[in-house]
Amino acid sequence: MAGHVKPISRLPRWTRWGWALALLLAVVPIPVVSRLEERDRFCISCHTAPEVTYYDRAQQALAGAEPTLDLSSDHYVAAGPFRCIDCHRGDSGPVHRATTLALGARDALIFIAGQADQTIEKTDIEAPDLLTAGCVRCHTESLLVVGFENHFHNKLPDAYAAWQAGGVLTAPPDFPNADVSALERYDTTVRCLDCHRAHTHVEGAEFTGYLDLENVTLPSCVRCHQDVGHGPLELVAP
């Protein structure tokens, strides 16, 4: 129909983010937003039940409560001074900076509209490239340890990209003479967050590095094996 305009909800995701970013920049200058995003309490001020829960878990961990209830909260204890934005800003480059600002603007609109998802244990991963870049920014060394015992890291596309960008390959401690000359590229859709869920609380997960082996990690292993055409397609938790 001539002159028909699509509702905003039906526009492509990046178009919606673009409008959200434009609205944000029209109201609040980037330097102000960037400064505010450094504060966790600002982040939760425009969020609802889930984000407040994640913040409370982190504060409990900082206060010495045990066990730490999820991977995100463990970062607050193990990684020194830590904030929400440390994972949610990606690589801090211009593309990820624009994506972060657009997501923030969109979330603000969702909050104002009263349509926030109140599910605490979320399983959907939004903006995986942004979040994965946040993981890689701090954990590149873990990706670049060669050898089969670390194949679930060093065969990821992000490991290959980190090596191509100048990352240094290292031998595992128990095999110091391992070949550290190159990594092979594998085409798989599996990323860091497919195994490491930051905000999911699973009883006893603190003993497995906050991995939900049965429901999350092993299915991701199988998917990677399917993608590359090699490796077992049936795995069970020990």
Image (cartoon, rainbow, N blue to C red):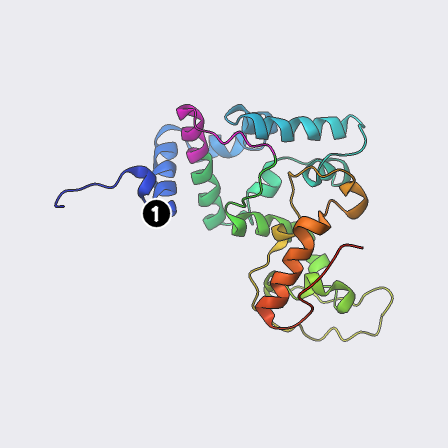
Q: Nearer the viewer, residue 167 or 4?
A: 4
Q: Please, which residue is most extreme toward the right here?
A: 174
> Is residue 65 found left or right of 97 in the rendered image?
right
Q: Position of residue 58 (x, y in %)?
A: 70, 30
Q: Position of residue 227 (x, y in %)?
A: 57, 67
Q: Which residues are magenta?
A: 105-120
> Is residue 211 found left or right of 225 in the rendered image?
right
- Residue displayed at 85% across by 70% down: 175
Q: Position of residue 116 (x, y in %)?
A: 47, 29
- Residue displayed at 43% across by 39% down: 102
Q: Do we see residue 186 in this rendering?
A: no
- Name which quarter of the figure residue 172 lies in: bottom right
Name the secondary structure under disc 1. loop
Q: Do we see residue 154 in this rendering?
A: yes
- Residue displayed at 74% across by 57% down: 236
> Is residue 198 found left or right of 128 in the rendered image?
right
Disc 1 marks which amino acid? Pro
Q: Quadrant of the C terminus?
A: bottom right
- Name which quarter of the figure residue 164 lies in: bottom right
User: Is 172 located above or below residue 203 in the figure?
Assistant: below
Q: Nearer the viewer, residue 31 or 37?
A: 37
Q: Position of residue 46 (x, y in %)?
A: 50, 26
> Is residue 34 found left or right of 238 in the rendered image?
left
**Tally of marks:** 1
- Asked if residue 172 lies in the magenta stretch, the reply is no
Circle 1 is placed at which residue position?
12
User: Is 41 located above or below residue 213 in the figure?
Assistant: above
Q: Residues within 10 Å of mark 1 (few under 14, many from 20)?
A: few
Q: Nearer the viewer, residue 207 or 77?
A: 207
